[in-house]
């Protein structure tokens, strides 16, 4: 994960949530201006990881990569250095 803690709840949105908003945006325009929110409830990484692991029938592990040293860790894992520097 890309944070300094797996215990801090952060707002999350699932791909189905985003897909629904995108589909609605392609429909005829509204009569007036409106905004669409994609932020859902806040969850911490560990429970989300456990639910995903259970869904796949596998154990899961959250690996916290601290901000300092993150680029080096990603490069060591085989990611392109240009991508790693853009995402840090």
Image: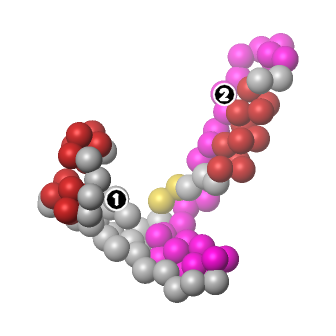
User: Which residue matches tag 1?
Assistant: 2
> Measured from the top left, where is residue 56 in percent x and y?
63, 77
The image quadrant of residue 63 is bottom left
Q: Is residue 48 something that shows in the picture?
A: yes
| Along the line of sight, the residue nearer the viewer: 28 or 42 | 28
User: Which one is nearer the viewer's eye here, 16 or 12?
Assistant: 16
Residue at the image point whose x is 80% and y is 16% from the top: 29
Which residue is tagged 2? 35
Residue drawn at point x = 66 percent, y = 27 percent: 35
Q: Which residues are magenta?
A: 28-56
Residue 70 seen anywhere in this rendered image of the structure:
no
- Identified at 72% across, 37% down, the residue is 21
Question: Magenta includes 65?
Answer: no
Disc 1 crowd, CA 10 A, few/some/many (<14, 14-19, 20+):
few
Q: CA distance from mark 1 to mark 2?
A: 28 Å
User: Is residue 55 shown above or below 1?
Assistant: below
Of badges 1 and 2, the one in the foreground is 1
Q: Is residue 34 left or right of residue 7?
A: right
Whether the magenta-drawn stretch holds residue 45 is answered as yes
Query: Could you say which is closer to the camera, residue 32 or residue 53?
Result: 53
Q: Determine the residue positioned at 77% across, 24% down.
A: 26
Q: Which quadrant is home to the N terminus?
A: bottom left
Residue 8, how many percent across, how many down? 41, 68
- Mark number displayed over residue 85: none
- In the image, residue 12 lies at what x, y percent? 56, 55
């Amino acid at each position: 994960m890309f944070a300094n803690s797996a215990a801090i709840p952060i707002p999350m949105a699932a791909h189905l949530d985003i897909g629904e908003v995108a589909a609605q945006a392609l429909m005829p325009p509204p009569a007036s201006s409106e905004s669409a929110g994609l932020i859902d409830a806040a969850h911490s990484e560990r429970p989300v990881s456990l639910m995903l692991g259970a869904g796949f029938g596998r154990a899961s592990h959250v690996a916290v990569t601290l901000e300092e040293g993150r680029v080096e860790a990603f490069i060591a894992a085989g990611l392109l250095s240009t991508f790693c520097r853009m995402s840090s």
